[in-house]
Image (tube, helix red, strand yellow):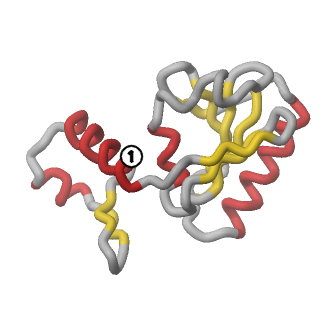
Amino acid sequence: MVYAEDTELNIRYLQKHILDSLNIGLDTLRNFAFNNLRRILPDVEIINLDGKFGVMAGGVYDASLILSKSMWNSENFSVDGDIVIAVPTRDMVYVTGSKNRQEINKLKSLALKDFENENYQVSPYLFRYNGTAFERFRD
């Protein structure tokens, strides 16, 4: 997890020594950061394309949506199997189901391509939601 300070002029990623100097616990910092994120995040849009989904939230903090435990459920994403996501860049979040082999294969290729060719890379891997957090998806 990376923490940042977002100002009118730029986004500054906070290095470990700065976080350590704050003298607050990681749980407190995480709660504070997530509350700030909810405050500044625009409305989240979920696009359903027959069992695969795209998630959009303004283009800057879209990848941070993986921190929202209340979002990742079958009401928002009716997928075949567990929720599996790709977050290749900060503004791209793709979702499908763990039992949808065809879409999993497409998502793997798309995540790698976007990660290698776009700005603000996050991860070329897929992740499965286990009910409380995302973990690396291995099939």
Outermost residue, right side: 102
Q: Is residue 72 above or below residue 43?
A: above
Measured along the vertical axis of the image, is residue 77 above or below residue 124? above
Q: Residue at x 55, y 66 (%)?
A: 120
Of 39 and 64, nearer the camera is 39
Of residues 97 and 123, the one nearer the viewer is 97
In the image, residue 89 sits, relative to residue 77, either above or below, namely: below
- Marker count (numbered): 1
Residue underneath mark 1 = 38
| Residue located 33% across and 54% down the image | 3
- In the displayed orientation, state which residue is furthest to the front: 43
Badge 1 marks a residue whose secondary structure is helix
- Pick out the residue farthest to the bottom: 9
Q: Quadrant of residue 29?
A: top left
For the point 80% across and 22% down, the residue is 80
Left of 128 or right of it: where is 80? Answer: right
Amino acid at dot 1: Arg
Residue 43 position, x and y percent, is 53, 50
The residue carrying pointer 1 sits among few (fewer than 14), some (14 to 19) or many (20 or more) residues within 10 Å by Cα, namely few
Q: Residue at x 75, y 19 (%)?
A: 81
Q: Is residue 32 left or right of residue 2?
A: left
| Quadrant (top left, top right, bottom left, bottom right) of the C terminus | top right
Residue 48: % across, % down: 77, 40
Image x and y of residue 134, in percent: 54, 31
Percent across and percent down for residue 124 are: 66, 51
